[in-house]
Image (spheres, rainbow, N blue to C red):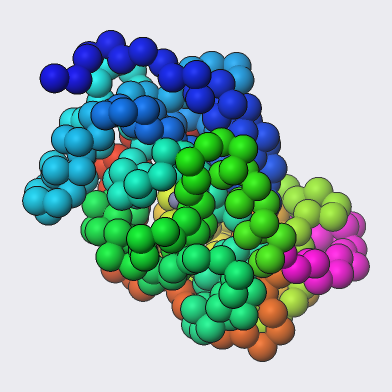
Amino acid sequence: MISRHPERPATLIPLAELSARIGSDPLLIQAAGGNTSVKAGDVMWIKASGTLLADALQRDIFVACDLPAMRAALDAGTERADQPAEFALVEGALRPSIETSLHAVFPQAVVVHVHCVNTLALAIRADAETALTRRLSGFDWAFVPYTKPGARLAALVRAARGEMTDVVVLGNHGLIVAAEGVAEAEALLRAVVAAVTVAPTEEPEVNHTRLAARAGDGFEPLPEGHPLHRVATERRLCDLAAAGSLYPDHVIFCGPGAAILGDDETPKMAVARRIGEGFPPPVFLLVPGMGALVRSDASSGARALVRCLGDVLARLEGGAAVTHLTEAQDRELSNWDAEKYRQALNAG
Ligand SMILES: [Zn+2]
C-alpha cells in the first residue's frame, strides 16, 4: 500500500531548480505549458495542472501520484487513465498535470516535457519526421504524430519508444526527454535543443504609427520587436497562421488559428465577424503587411502564446508545408474540462 503522505525525495530540489530555469525561457515554455516529473519508488511527483514551471522555486508546484495505479489504468486502457486526479496521493487544491500519463510511460526517473519553439518549427511541418531525422541522428529518439494530450497519446508514446529511447518529439506539440537524474535530463534537453535550433528570420520593419492607427476597440499594437509582427508582415506566414492552429496550447489560450484584420475593418468589426464565423473573440489580430495587435486585457498566458506563434513561425524553413490541427482537433481541445480548469486557475 502506498502512503497517502509520501516523503518528498531529495531529487525534487534540483528538479524545481531546473523547472524554474526552463520555465522562464519563452523559447522552451509558455504560460502553464510543459511539465517535469521525478519517480521515487512507486510515487511519481509531477507538476500540477495550471501551475507555472517558472514558479517552482517560489511555491510547491509538484503533486504525488500513485505510479503503479496509473500504469495499470494505462495498460487496461480504461477511461480512468485520462483522469490524473484519480491517482493523486494527497488530496488538495492541486491536480496532477493532464499530461501525467505521458510521464508515467517512461521508465527513466526524470522526465521533462517542453513546448520548445525550435522543436515546434519542425514538429508542425508536413515532413516533420524527415526534417527531424536530419537533425537528431545522434539520439535514440522517436516521433509520435499529433494526438490530443492524454492517455491515448501516452499509449502511442509507449508504443513508439525503443527500450532505451530517451527523446520523443510529439507532432504539432513539443518535446520530451528522459534520464535517470536531473542533471542528465537537463544535459540531454540542451543537446536536443541545440540540434534543432535555427536563427529566427530577420526582424521586419514595422511602421508603428500606421499600425497604431489600426488599433482601438480594446486592441493595442504589440510592442516593437515582438515576433508576431513578422507573421503579420510576411504574406506566407500570415496565411499559414490564419489557416488554422499549429499546436494545442495556442487553441487553449488564443482560440483556433488567427484572425486577420481586413483592409476596411475596425477591430470591432473583425471581432464580430469572427464570432459570427463560430470562433471565440480573438486575443490578437494580424494586420497584413503592417504588424499585429493584441487585446489590451489579454492574460499573461494568452500573451505568452501570442509570442510563441511568432517565435515558431520565425523559425519555419522557407517553403516548408505545415500540418494544421483539424477543426475536430481544435474543438476537442476547447471543449475539454481539464483544460477549462487549467485556464481558470491560470487566469486567477
Ligand atoms: Zn505538452
Residue 25 shows up from this direction: yes
Residue 263 shows up from this direction: no
Is 118 magenta? The answer is no
Residue at (35%, 60%) from the top-left corner? 163
The residue segment tinted magenta is 197-216
Of residue 155 and residue 224, the one placed in the foreground of this image is 155
Residue 344 in the figure: left or right of residue 133? left
In this rendering, the count of numbered labels is 0
Q: Main secondary structure of the magenta part?
A: loop
Residue at (81%, 60%) from the top-left corner? 211
The quadrant in which residue 277 appears is bottom left
The quadrant in which residue 42 appears is top left
Is 208 magenta? The answer is yes
x and y, in percent, of residue 185 in the image: 56, 44
Of residue 45 and residue 252, the one placed in the foreground of this image is 45
x and y, in percent, of residue 27 in the image: 68, 51
> Compared with residue 253, is residue 40 higher up or lower down, i.e. above or below?
above
Residue 231 in the figure: left or right of residue 299? right
Residue 58 in the figure: left or right of residue 224? left
The quadrant in which residue 333 appears is bottom left
Residue at (66%, 88%) from the top-left corner? 319
x and y, in percent, of residue 183 in the image: 62, 38
x and y, in percent, of residue 59 in the image: 54, 16
Residue at (14%, 43%) from the top-left corner? 72
Of residue 141 and residue 301, the one placed in the foreground of this image is 141
- Which image quadrant: the N terminus? top left
